[in-house]
């Protein structure tokens, strides 16, 4: 999917109550991609721990705050984390972190790896 998309955005909250917020964040980024003022570059890390992780509760609430803060770093356009669902019949399904930057694959990879390590630590706690 990453190879076919200029931007991947998912809800940050579980239950998914932040559709409007995420759409508001996404639209200016999509407009900038469309007009060529930014060039999206995306990295993702899979985490072998699918499950449902409620974000209103700790420790996920603090992780979502860190995920959101990472999106405000210079050069970072979008951050998302996905739970994956353990009841799926897809063997490759996993939790993941996706980070899109303005044309900087090294930054995308570094931030995605950092957030994936953070999420895995939270899941294991």
Image (cartoon, rainbow, N blue to C red):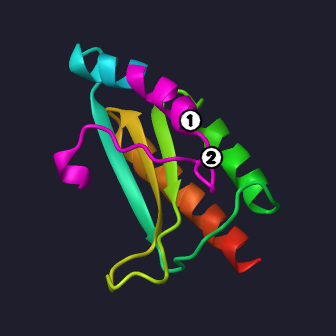
Whether residue 75 is visible, yes or no, is no
Q: Quadrant of residue 46?
A: bottom left
Q: What element carries label 2?
A: helix
Q: Give the range drawn in magenta.
A: 1-27
For the point 70% across and 63% down, the residue is: 54
For the point 34% across and 45% down, the residue is: 42
The reply to whether dot 2 and dot 1 touch (C-beta < 8 Å) is yes
For the point 38% across and 76% down, the residue is: 93
Q: From this view, report whether residue 18 is shown above or below residue 62.
A: above
What percent of the width, then of the height, locates residue 71? 56, 35
For the point 73% across and 60% down, the residue is: 60
Quadrant holding the N terminus: bottom left
What percent of the width, then of the height, locates residue 69? 66, 37
Q: Nearer the viewer, residue 103 or 7?
A: 7
Q: Which of the labelled discs sits on residue 67, or is there none?
A: 2
Q: Which of the labelled discs sits on residue 117, or is there none?
A: none
Q: Mark 1 points at which residue?
A: 71
């Amino acid at each position: 999917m990453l190879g076919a998309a200029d931007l991947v955005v998912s809800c940050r909250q579980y239950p998914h109550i932040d559709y409007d917020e995420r759409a508001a964040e996404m639209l200016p980024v999509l407009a900038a991609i469309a007009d060529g003022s930014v060039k999206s570059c995306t990295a993702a890390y899979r985490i072998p721990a699918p499950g449902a992780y409620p974000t209103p509760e700790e420790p996920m609430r603090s992780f979502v705050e860190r995920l959101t803060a990472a999106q405000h770093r210079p050069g970072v356009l979008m951050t998302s984390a996905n739970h994956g669902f353990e009841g799926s019949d897809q063997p490759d399904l996993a939790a993941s972190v996706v980070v899109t930057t303005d044309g900087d694959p090294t930054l995308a990879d570094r931030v995605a790896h950092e957030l994936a390590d953070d999420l895995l630590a939270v899941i294991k706690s």
